[in-house]
Amino acid sequence: MSKGFLIDMDGVMYRGGQMIPGADAFIRQLRDDGTPFLFLTNNSQRTRRDVVTKLARMGIEVEEQQVFTCAMATARFLANQKPNGTAYVLGEGGLLNALHQNGYSVVDHDPDFVVVGEGRTLNWDMLETATQMILDGAKLIATNDDPNCPTSRGTRPGAGATIAFLEKATGRKALSIGKPSPLMMRMARKEIGLETSETVMIGDTMETDILGGVQMGYQTILVLSGGTQLADIPKHPYQPDLIIDSVAELVRKKDEQVVLRTPVTVPDDSANEFVASLRR
Ligand SMILES: [Mg+2]
């Protein structure tokens, strides 16, 4: 059976601006094999071009069409719900660009939607303006619900923290489009023309990547090269199909059988079969 991959970036391809060893070889292998893949990110700040440049500087060569951001998913969702609508945006370039490309106007009064991503430009006036707009009837949309995000200095608040603020202030609930929402997970699969049974999600975060994949019926691979520790995994009521140290384990080596760490939940035979099928 053919396979294709949806691949998270932060914690899978790189960490703190440093490429994770083997990530470049894994992507080169996918390209050489003609295996469909798409990078999936819950970061709405960057455009797909920004993402391509960031990866290229680390030595990972991909095209813009191989990047799918939660900002793109959000803009497409809104364009489908209400074509040519208006949005008040708490976010940065990636989100503004995606909305414009999908026929949306960015306004500062009477919007159809208040759309929240992450960004460093947020201030009290914007939160106050957004609160009043939501109370006046604008619908609250989150590009993603991630509470925070690791940085080289520690942790920064994510879009989910801003959303929690606005939900508390207004008593309204947001709709979140990014991972693990089926909205983004399904759009991503369709973007590269895969069937559900052909789709494998690779990520480092249980709450987004793995839950998103599990909900859709995709196969899931958790990498331990990002934020998740092995000991944390059994605490969740859902499990990945496979656990590996990093994507380097999926790279073919000459004359060598790949040995994988024992998965927590999958019996050895099916896991080995699964991995063998990935490497075929
Ligand atoms: Mg990640």
Image (tube, grey):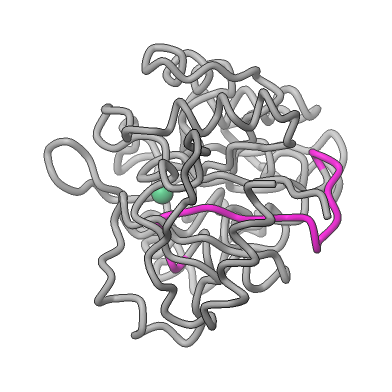
Q: Position of residue 220 (x, y in %)?
A: 58, 63
Q: Nearer the viewer, residue 123 or 221?
A: 221
Residue at the (28%, 70%) spot, across then down: 230
- Residue 80 magenta: no
- Residue 199 magenta: yes
Q: Which of the 4 image quarters holds residue 196?
A: bottom right
Does residue 256 appear anywhere in the picture?
Answer: yes
Q: Position of residue 180 (x, y in %)?
A: 57, 62
Residue at the (86%, 55%) spot, across then down: 195
In the depicted structure, whether residue 139 falls above or below residue 20: below
Residue at the (40%, 72%) spot, across then down: 262
Judged left or right of residue 189, residue 125 is: left
Residue furthest to the front in view is 255
Q: Nearer the viewer, residue 99 or 192?
A: 192
Q: Which of the 4 image quarters holds residue 181?
A: bottom right
Q: Nearer the viewer, residue 77 or 224?
A: 224
Q: Position of residue 275 (x, y in %)?
A: 59, 59
Residue furthest to the left in view is 153
Q: In the image, which residues are magenta?
A: 191-207
Q: Position of residue 54 (x, y in %)?
A: 42, 18
